[in-house]
Image (cartoon, helix red, strand yellow):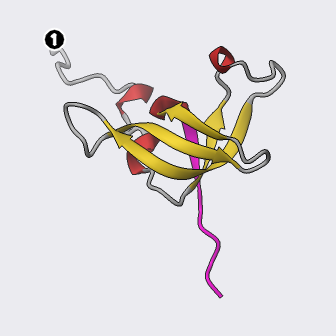
Amino acid sequence: MSADRGVPSSPHSERPIFLDVAPGMTVVVRHDSLTGEMPGKDWWMGQVIHCGGAARNPSMHNLFQIADVDSGVIRWVNADLVTHILPRAPEQ
């Protein structure tokens, strides 16, 4: 009998989306109940202003400064709360 000794695939093995975030992008951010946001809000959309690097590897962003597109409020956001990167509008 043979045993499969490979690394099991899991949903967490794919590349995190926040690694592709850069200033100027529009992103969807998951609601974080610890920041005092309204409890009925699941997500919000914002424009990335700044990407902060981690201490060990400055090229891996772990903190973003994002402007909420609805209110204009600028927030610091943990990278793992970014769920989607919206495509840029085609230039005319």
Please give the range of residues in magenta: 82-92
Give the x, y percent position of residue 84.
Answer: 58, 45
Residue sitting at 68 percent across and 17 percent down? 33
The amino acid beneath tag 1 is Met
Say above or below: 91 vs 80.
below
Is residue 91 a member of the stretch shown in magenta? yes
Is residue 57 a member of the stretch shown in magenta? no
Quadrant for the C terminus in the image: bottom right
Q: For mark 1, what is the residue?
A: 1
Give the x, y percent position of residue 36.
Answer: 72, 18
Taking the view exactly as shown, the residue that stands out farthest to the front is 73
Residue sitting at 34 percent across and 27 percent down? 9
Residue sitting at 75 percent across and 28 percent down? 42
Q: In this view, does 3 lie to the left or right of 39?
A: left
Give the x, y percent position of residue 22.
Answer: 44, 55
Taking the view exactly as shown, the residue that stands out farthest to the right is 40
Q: How crowded is mark 1: few (under 14 residues within 10 Å), some or many (20 or more)?
A: few
Q: Is residue 45 left or right of residue 17?
A: right
Say above or below: 8 vs 83.
above
Question: Which residue is at the front of the view, 10 or 56?
Answer: 56
Q: In this view, does 24 lie to the left or right of 18?
A: right
Helix, strand or loop at mark 1: loop
Question: Which residue is at the front of the view, 5 or 9?
Answer: 9
